[in-house]
Image: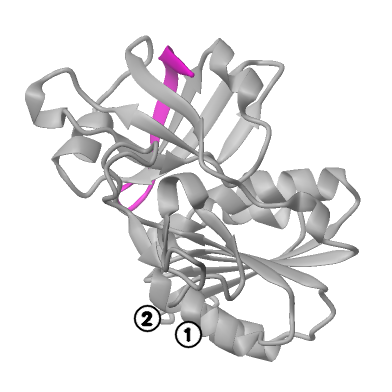
Amino acid sequence: MQEEMRVVKQTSIARNIYEIVLQGGITKNMTKPGQFVHMRVGNSSEFMLRRPISICSVDQQAQTLTCLYRAEGKGTTHLSQLKSGDTVDILAPLGNGFPVEAAQKTALLIGGGIGVPPLYELSKQLNARGIKTIHVLGFQSAEDMFYIKQFEALGTTHVATVDGTYGTKGFVTDVVNAIPVDYDTFYTCGPIVMIKAIQETLPNTPGYVSLEERMGCGIGACYACVCEADNEDGYVKICTDGPVFEKGALAL
């Protein structure tokens, strides 16, 4: 569905990371964690292509959508300048999300950088089903961290920073290797190199991975987000076949 959603508020929450809250009736269709929205960040031809941004949280009663994103290019920088009362053209919800029903008792959620946001709605929904959640969040530095308290309110939360300015010095895999394996399922989102490392670290645990990928259309028409896969076609389109896949389905 397409809708002009109203900006409720926008806040800078970490280095180049923004939290934008949008309001609109389209939120009634946002029920599965891990899906994304395609935002038109401006009306000029310079911003003709939409930007895919993951869904961080949805409040069905208030009809609000919260997204977290990194302002690193012209499009997202322009988006970061929007104020309360402005509108954003949204296509949503897009893609296949995380299967919350896959977890039995305890789930391990692993996020890296801007791959952290979609895990928040996932953790909320898992908690609502009575599933215990353990979170491992990775960032470059303490300046890049966000939503730590929000995740801590939902379950045990471990943080790794590459430079060691907060939590464990190193990568999310260093934390995963150090915690007890008392979870039955894992969910992860982040850079491909991180996802590959997680799959190698947890070879015997069922899991689901969500890929970050640049997209053109968001609906499977442009083939800009194709990824090699172990299927009959030899590839998948991240926007429509994903962004969430079962562990091992992609040729990473």
Report the quarter where the C terminus lies: bottom left
Nearer the observer, 55 or 157: 55
Q: How is the image coloured?
A: one colour
Q: Is residue 113 left or right of residue 86?
A: right
Examine the rendering and report whether any part of residue 201 can be seen. yes
Q: Look at the numbered disc 1 and give the secondary structure of its residue.
A: strand
Please name the residue that numbered disc 1 is placed on: 169
Examine the rendering and report whether any part of residue 168 can be seen. no
Nearer the observer, 40 or 215: 215
Name the residue furthest front: 232
Q: Amino acid at mark 2?
A: Asp
In three-dimensional space, the C-alpha distance between marks 2 and 1, rounded to whole angstroms, equals 6 Å
Q: Is residue 3 magenta?
A: yes
Q: Quadrant of residue 61?
A: top right
Q: Amino acid at mark 1?
A: Lys
Please name the residue that numbered disc 2 is placed on: 163
Residue 207 percent coordinates (x, y): 68, 70
Residue at image location 55% in from the left, 17% down from the top? 26
Q: Are marks 2 and 1 in contact (CB under 8 Å)?
A: yes
Nearer the observer, 123 or 245: 245
Badge 2: residue crowd in 10 Å (few <14, some 14–19, many ≥20)? some
Residue segment shown in magenta: 1-18
Q: Quadrant of residue 141?
A: bottom left
Residue 189 percent coordinates (x, y): 52, 62
Give the vertical position of 23 relative to 158 (above or below). above
